[in-house]
Amino acid sequence: MKMCPKCGNEFPDDWTFCGQCATALVPKGAGVAPPQAKAPPPGNSTAPQAPQGPTLGSLGARVVAHLIDLVFLALAFWMTGTAYGAWFGGLTESGFNLNGLPALVIISLTLVFFLIYLIVFEGLVGATPGKLILGLRVKTVGGQACSMAQAVVRNLLRIADGMIFYLVGLITALVTKKRQRVGDLAASTVVARESCGTVARAGAAIFLLACVVGVIFASMYLRRHPRVPIATFAITNVRFADSETGPARTSPRYKPEEEVALYYEVVGYARDPDGQIAVVTQNQLLAPDGKPFFENKTIETRQKVAADAGPVKMHFTIGLPPWAPPGQFTINVQAEDQVAHKTQSASPTFSVDAPAIEASATFVVKDIELAASRDGAALSPPVFTAGQSVWLRFRILGMKADDKGRVVVTEDWGVTGPDGKSAFQKTDDSMIDDQFIYPPPFVPYREYVTLPSSVDPGEYRFHVTLHDKIGGADFTIDQPFTINKP
């Protein structure tokens, strides 16, 4: 038998608290003198009543205890994700991949580990570390220690309590007399307030601290020695080549009017939950003076790929204009992973071998020559046969551009025969009407006329007047040539 040291009532051995005053019971004859009996008030009975049960813990303390236990949940999540990524792939620079199947596995294992944590601690010592620190313990409704089976039931039913962000469990605890959530009702348990002692509280805190330190060192080790290397977002295999499969140019050098082809690959990109990737690259060409030479080119790759897909291959091609200045050009490449919100950059360079660029402050035409074909040798003296094409070639310098880089040049041109009469004529013909990022110091120009074989032989003249529409300047060419009979 047990007795109450306060009121002296006796109770069976399986009772823990006094049914009269809720004082903890002690074994009968334990050396505690029973209080002097008092005559009960008329009409009242002194017979033992049913026990009221343990003193309940407050909901506020239970919430704080659960928040402390969530530290273990966070540690389990980080450790599980890191271990999975180290063994099966998915580690990133700042963490691990949490898309698709890896996300399902990591989250499921984390919840299992947390459930085991709750069940083992409540089943063995009646309280998790969080509850111990807050002076709480799980007990049966009658005040006995929580069994392992009861711990399993009350924690498995957290699935029901946790619905709608734990609103179900909160409402149930608020409306029941013993502050029981669904799991407590099913397991016949309550969360009681109980002094756990300084040693127990310190031990719980040390346990959680040890878990934090252990996870930090374990994750550092796994990230330094992963079975599958960490997927780092990067631009790799950057090379200038004449084709995608051709060898790389070790010292890339080009000439004006040649094509420059840059190949590179983007690796370590992330996928969204649907397996889609979004890799966007910006390619900017800078002239030797550091100024933008062409308009930026954007390349986007948006598609669904497998988890083990290879690198995204990129190809950037530019044609050098005739007026490309000599020196070292730079291509600034910036790659963006719009799924993981990461960027990387690269700045490969190549050289252009060209003569020094001649500039002119005034609108002028230079290097005037006549030839029998577009790229043929200049004729001196310029003698042609009737029926043959006559090509006029020259360079235009000193054109002015507006504030948006637009250059506009037109011409009036024609051919006069030996009699001084016009054999061919065009007025206000457009020559140049373009917008340039990098204003050209000169523009080469070619035009031709083919006189019929029936024309009279003799001396003919090319008459060309050029008009710089932006700069408001003109320049006239008067170039003679001779036509002989076939």
Image (cartoon, grey):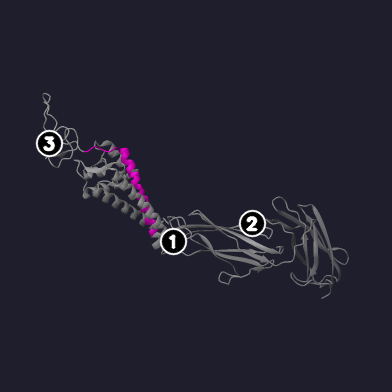
Whichever of labels 3 and 1 marks the residue nearer the N terminus, that label is: 3
In the rendered image, the residue lying farthest to the right is: 419
Place of residue 89 in the rendered image (x, y in percent of width and height, measured from the top left): 41, 62
In the rendered image, the residue lying farthest to the front is: 31
Crowding near pointer 2: few (<14 within 10 Å), some, many (20+)? few
**Residue 295, which numbered label?**
2
Quarter of the image with the N terminus is top left
Circle 1 sits on which residue? Answer: 224
**Residue 290, which numbered label?**
none
Q: Please tell me whether mark 2 sits on a helix, a strand or a loop.
A: loop
The residue sitting at 88% across, 64% down in the picture is 420
Up-down relation of residue 182 to residue 362 (above or below)? above
Q: Nearer the viewer, mark 2 or mark 1?
A: 1
Give the residues in magenta: 54-83
The residue sitting at 29% across, 43% down in the picture is 198
Residue 82 forms part of the magenta stretch? yes
Place of residue 273 in the rendered image (x, y in percent of width and height, measured from the top left): 42, 55
In the rendered image, the residue lying farthest to the top is: 42
Whichever of labels 2 and 1 marks the residue nearer the N terminus, that label is: 1
Circle 3 sits on which residue? Answer: 10
**Front-most of 40 and 322?**
40
